[in-house]
Amino acid sequence: MSLAAAEELAEDRLLDGRVRLLQPRQGLRAGLDAVLLAAGIRARPGQTVLEGGCGSGAVFLCLMARVPGLRVFAVEREPALAALARRNAALNGVAAQVTVLEGDIADPALRRALPRLDHSFANPPYWPDGSPPPEAMRAGATHAGAGPDLAAWTRALAAPLERRGSLSLILPAARFAEAAAALRAARCAEVVLTPFWPRAGQAARRVLLRGHRLGRGPDQIQAGLVLHEGDGWSAAAEAVLRGGGALPEH
């Protein structure tokens, strides 16, 4: 789908309305993964961060809603989505703090345009093979195809990090071992695994992994977040998804 016919866009609200997000009505749409990833990034005001594959900008906008004063660099290979991410930054009043670069995250020339970073993060294409969805932008977001694989994404996101800077990835639980190995290969150790449980007692379907550039400490498995209780979200999930809070560290 082309976004040139801009008025195939819908405006959604994230974090109980604190983030306004224009998205395509059909196909690629940000949601739960974007909010959870943003909640897991341990950024502080005034730091510089990078998002790989930013799409329409949902992750970095949710992060900026929680952490004021960030300088954001974002990379997106689809020109229409890069333009939409810039439009969403303006819609949320943070355009002056956001630079959206068009290109492939693994392109060395693009990486040379980046400053040193405190944090990097992505919701990368997570399936290396299989049948992609028919909508081209959605397929590009979920299936690696001919693009960079997970190891290449991780190397690219790690390269500009300052010592002890963090690299965060949200992925299906089935890929956590591969992602942890990719983090270590990119010299991001002290790997922290945070599971997202659909309900108490159920297997996690999504996980967040965070590594630290040149870290030397032990790996950790966090208690994680139970998403649903009864007929709705759990209280802990509400604090993140509606309240805009950070994921608990324990």
Image (spheres, rainbow, N blue to C red):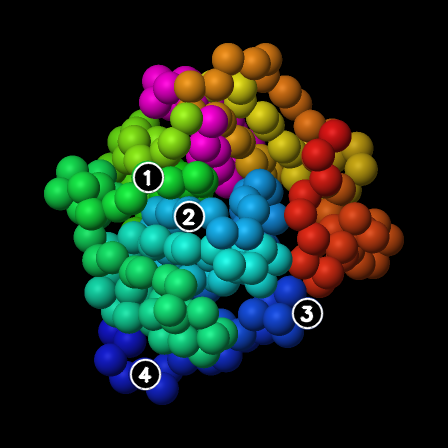
Q: Which amino acid does label 3 sit on?
A: Asp
Choose top left, top right, bottom left or bottom right for residue 202.
Answer: top right
How far separated are the C-alphas under marks 1 and 4?
35 Å
Locate residue 174, reporting x and y percent. 51, 29
The 10 Å Cα crowd at callout 1, few under 14, some 14 to 19, many 20 or more, is: some
Q: Do the residues labelled 2 and 4 touch (CB within 8 Å)?
A: no
Q: Which residue is drawn at 29% across and 64% down?
A: 82
Q: Which amino acid does label 4 sit on?
A: Ala
Q: Which quadrant: the C terminus? A: top right
Q: Are marks 2 and 3 in contact (CB under 8 Å)?
A: no
Label drawn at residue 116: 1
Q: Which amino acid does label 1 sit on?
A: Arg
Magenta extent:
164-188
Locate residue 135, reporting x and y percent. 32, 62
Q: Which of the two marks, 3 or 4, is nearer to us in this view?
A: 3
Q: Is mark 1 on a helix, strand or loop?
A: loop
Left-right relation of 53 to 147: right
The 10 Å Cα crowd at callout 4, few under 14, some 14 to 19, many 20 or more, is: few
Q: Which of 9 and 51 is in front in this view?
A: 51
N-term mark: 2 or 4: 4
N-term mark: 2 or 3: 3
Q: Residue at x 41, y 80 (%)?
A: 9
Q: Residue beneath label 3, please?
A: 16
Q: Residue beneath label 4, please?
A: 6
